[in-house]
Each structure stands twice: as structure tokens, then as C-alpha cells.
Amino acid sequence: KAGVTQTPRYLIKTRGQQVTLSCSPISGHRSVSWYQQTPGQGLQFLFEYFSETQRNKGNFPGRFSGRQFSNSRSEMNVSTLELGDSALYLCASSPRGRITDTQYFGPGTRLTVL
Amino acid sequence: AQTVTQSQPEMSVQEAETVTLSCTYDTSESDYYLFWYKQPPSRQMILVIRQEAYKQQNATENRFSVNFQKAAKSFSLKISDSQLGDAAMYFCAYTYLRDTGTASKLTFGTGTRLQVTL
């Protein structure tokens, strides 16, 4: 099976712009989670989607949003970008998000905000 | 609140030697899992090993094993016969069973950078 894929791998944006990141989970996986990784804050949970519904949400401002499509692909959007949004954004998928499921991570999207 | 602490920002080990990475966690949950993830320079997180809290037996995966001390809330990773390819950032992580029957988010420690020398 193909692994989790994320596009694009690298992005450069300027403050105030918006950005959309995409994540394609492993075939058959219906749960997709997003994490932000920064040197200062480490790995922080953004949200989790299952069957097109947001099932869990972290402590991020409303500028961060996401959605999931019927084929389980997920996108996250960040509006009005700030310098502090520069980070590696990781997506992880699992079959159903059960505690017994292993989460498989994608290679990440490196976002730089100038 | 659940927290995961890794007190060793960096560790170094010689090739073929053994190294132990430390992790402690805090939780009031009874049904939880613990993990060690490896993040090499490519930045892709790879699961190394997992431990179910209800299991008393320590998990092992080839050269990787854990020392799970539930009462002490300690979860260390031992890497035996270290190889150059083991050089990476290692993250300890935790998840628990929510009331909904699904897993909570993964809570990660701050990571330990492992250097492997010849």
C-alpha cells in the first residue's frame, strides 16, 4: 500500500495570505489527524477528521480549519498567515482512530511565512 | 492534563553499543497506550514501538525494547547494537481511550536527539 502523502512538500507564503495543505491517507484509512511541529512548541495536535466529520480539535485559533472529503482525503487551511505559523505540518492516518490503531505519518509540508 | 516529559535533549552512543532514552508521563486515565516514534532528518515520523498500559510485559521489536514502569509512570526505550541509521530524533508519545471509544490525540514529549558515532 502507498503511504500517507502530503502536498505540497514545501511552501513559502507572506503574512496575511492564506494557504491550503493536502493529505491523502493510506487506502482504507478513514481517520486523518493533523499536527503542527515547531522548534519552540514541539508537536501540537490541530484536529482529527473521521468520515468527513471533525471528531477532535486542539487549541488553535479559528484561522486554522480543515475538512475531509468522501474519499478520506483531508485539507487544512490557514487564513491570515502570521510569522508564527511557520512550521512543519504533519498529517497522520489510521483505519478508524481507535486506540488499537497505529497512526502512520506523512512526510509533512514545510510552511515558511515571510 | 496529560503530559509527556523527555529530560534528555541529546544523547550519543557508539555504534554497536546500547543506549537508553528516558520518558515520564502524567495521566489519570487507566486505558492508555505509549509509543516511541523516530523522526530522521527526512522528517517523516516512524513508529518504533508501542506499549499497551494494561500489559505488564515490556514490548520488544528486534533491537528496540521498552522498560515500562506503570506505577512510576516511566517508559524508557533501549536500543541495542546501535546502528548509524538509528541517528534521529526520538519522541515519546501517549494516547488514551476517550469516552467516545476512540483514541485521544497523540501527546508528544519534546524529543531526544540521538547521535550515533563510529
Image (cartoon, rainbow, N blue to C red):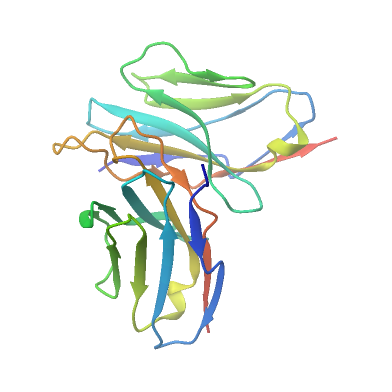
Going by the image, does A5 lie left or right of B1?
right
> Residue placed farthest to the top in the image?
B57
Q: Residue at x 23, y 25 (%)?
A: B30
Where is residue B17 shown, x and y percent of the image? 75, 23
User: Which one is nearer the viewer's eye here, B26 or A71?
Assistant: A71
Q: Eyeballing the image, is A23 above or below B32?
A: below
Instruction: Determine if residue A55 is in view.
Output: yes
Q: Eyeballing the image, is B111 above or below B80?
A: below
Going by the image, does A59 lie left or right of A8?
left
Where is residue B92 shown, x and y percent of the image? 47, 37
Where is residue A113 shown, x and y percent of the image? 50, 80
Residue B11: image quadrant is top right
Q: Residue at x 27, y 38 (%)?
A: B103
Where is residue A64 shown, x and y percent of the image? 31, 71
Instruction: Determine if residue B109 is in view.
Output: no
Going by the image, does A25 lie left or right of A5?
left
Q: Residue at x 29, y 40 (%)?
A: A96
